[in-house]
Amino acid sequence: MTTLDTSNDLSVRKQTIARHFASAGDYDQHANIQQKVCQSLLTNITQTEQDSVLEVGAGTGQMTRLLAEHIQSPYWVINELCSEQAATLQSILPTAGIVIGDAETIDLKENHSLIISANAVQWFDDPLSFVTQSASRLRTGGQLVFSTFTPNNFLQIKALTGQGLYYPDIDKWQSTLVDACFENIKLSTQRFDLPFPTPYAILKHMKLTGVSTNQTQVKADNTQTFIWTKSRLRQFESDYWQHFSEEDETGKLVVNLTYEVLTVSAFKS
């Protein structure tokens, strides 16, 4: 199939996000939580035989690989923001149409029987708009399955720096799904507290999974730049040890980073 590349039309913010992920060459080695989430999403798909599947924000293809192995469909559309991933995604699903670009602004066709997105919607300018867009792209009875994160995600980083992406809470997702005429709505959360040897190791982990701690979105319509200085980094490390450290099972002192995942399944009525 052909690849449609609209990456030249990205906003400045989306260009920045794409660059961060393009430079995260070892993403799959460090994105263990994201891989677990993909496995969980797969179990939420009710039909293994589909007519048309749209994946939004495919990234390195963690979810795409699982779909290729377990879901049958004669028609696939795989969307990704970062053009560097096009060849990888095409190799996973050779018959798929690969659409590179901003899922919030480009045409991703209609009448799909399944729309799925793993760990991507939080990067939208308006995450909740994914629900209304999906409603227009799904056929009646089609399933929407996606994961994102809750306001508790990376709570330590937000507490110490005031920085963080805008994560709508579970009530906002529920009401948006209802307003978009979805039914059989299921929302669930799962928390993971990952231990690291130092606060600096946490920052490195975040960078390796495509998350910049320099430019973050604290409100849906407001992107701020956060500059690390030597003194700010020293203060961050000191505060992290003071507020978010504990002994592991061996008695060694570690610091934790929290992931809190929201998983959603719903059907278009």
Image (spheres, rainbow, N blue to C red):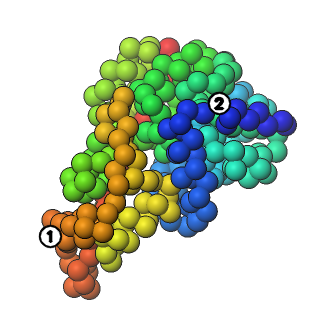
**What amino acid is labelled 2 in the image?**
Asp
The residue lying toward the viewer, choosing from 195 and 9, is: 9
Residue 192 position by quadrant: bottom left
The foreground one among 141 and 7 is 7
Camera sees residue 181: yes
The span from disc 2 to disc 1 (Cα, nearest Å) is 44 Å
Residue 34 — which label?
A: none
Query: Outermost residue, right direction?
Result: 1
Say which mark, if any, is on residue 242. Answer: 1
**SS at badge 2:** helix
Residue 157 on image: x %, y %: 28, 56
Q: Residue at image x 56%, y 60%?
A: 24
Q: Earlier in the sequence, mark 2 or mark 1?
A: 2
Left or right, 172 with reference to 64:
left
Q: For mark 2, what is the residue?
A: 9
> What amino acid is found at the position of numbered circle 1 in the picture?
Gln
